[in-house]
Image: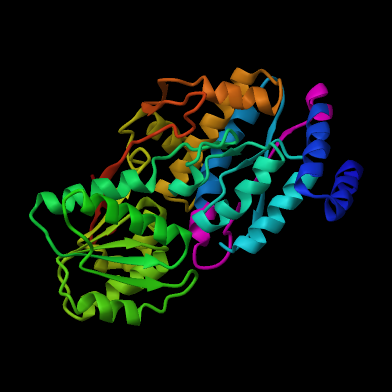
Amino acid sequence: MQRRRVLSSLGACLGASSLAGVAGSAWAQAAAGSGAIVLGQSAPFTGPSAQLGLQFNLGAQLYFDQVNAAGGVNGRRIELKRMDDGYDPERCVANTKQFIADGVFALFGYVGTPTSLAALPLATEAKLPFIAPFTGAQALREPFNRYAIHVRASYFDETAAIVKQVTSIGIKRVAVFYQNDAYGKAGLEGVERALKALNMEPAAVGTVERNSNEVAPALKDIMAVKPEAIVQIGAYKACATFIRLARQQGYSGNFYNVSFVGTQALMDELGAVAKGVAVSQVMPFPYSPAMPISGEYLAALKDQRGVAPNYSGIEGFVAAKVMVEGLKRARGAGREAFIDAISGMKDVNIGGFPLDFGPQKHAGSRFVELTLLTEDGRVRR
């Protein structure tokens, strides 16, 4: 505790590069003993996107708890510390600086594109692994960054699958409703790229601000062109508000969302209005043991009263399993060895979920499948 107070005091006056040495020294000291392997997670645990952070954290903690109960990794427990950023980049930066000052081993499971974009430069300068961010933004993947490790497929992969599905049934007028920030623009770019390959472009676009449900202007612009399908790149509350209002105006076309929307959260918001809403998924189906990893997740969830399986939860579970696999392979040798261990995970199968990393390839998955929400609160593959 005293060491942490000293590091925090230093953090108030040192930059990220100086903190890299402090944090590295702290890790080296911990590695020599039997202290916990501490991970830091900045995510929205309050506010309109809270369910994404809460469910991801719960899924990850389920797996870490199992590992700790079995003796940890090389005899060391894993401790996941979380700090709330409310999906606000400035708060995320402050949290990240605190984690660096505290000497965490890695940053894990950050939620969101704008927050991750704000945090990654700090992690890179401090030479801190930034693993399994809950975002598919290309700007976090290109150019290649040794310290950024992605478990999920990209938004370009997701939007390409959505456009392929939409156009395969003859739809021509595709509108895009997107969040006016780095996340929404990344998804919009993915849709535009996929449509351009077919000599098409969005029939209309409409925006909503982050952490806002003011969708009326976007709804007016998009409904004016009578779209046959609407792709949404936003948070679950804003997307649900848009869908409800569009249905009230008589719109009968399908809505397509990318995975970051939070499938369960969106379904909870919509209720019976969920009929005709599709979501692209980048994780295994969490509602039945369709893959061994799904069965592991469901078994771990049994003792959690009142918590239903969901895609955000299994993403945290999968991310934690990848984290542990990297730690086991690194054999306690430190951060750089951990990154090298992840880079060596080529053609790895994590409970039926394929991953393929490499020394210059830190995006492990391109798995995408489309699911359809039902009016009675189910997800169909």
Task: Check the image and tell me how it is coloured.
Answer: rainbow
Residue 69, quarter of picture: top right
Q: Is residue 274 above or below residue 97?
A: below
Q: Residue 144 location, x and y as percent?
A: 51, 36
Q: Residue at x 40, y 60 (%)?
A: 185
Q: Is residue 272 magenta?
A: no
Q: Residue 305, can we see it?
A: yes
Residue 331, quarter of picture: top right
Q: Quadrant of the N terminus?
A: top right
Q: Residue 291 location, x and y as percent?
A: 34, 30
Q: Is residue 219 above or below residue 369?
A: below
Q: Is residue 48 magenta?
A: yes
In the depicted view, which residue is nearer to us: 130 or 14?
14
Q: Residue 302, can we see it?
A: no
For the magenta stretch, what is the residue range? 29-54
In the depicted view, which residue is nearer to us: 285 or 349?
349
Query: From the viewer's perspective, is 183 left or right of 287?
Result: right
Q: Residue 117 location, x and y as percent?
A: 56, 52
Q: Is residue 350 above or below residue 21?
A: above
Q: Residue at x 63, y 36 (%)?
A: 129
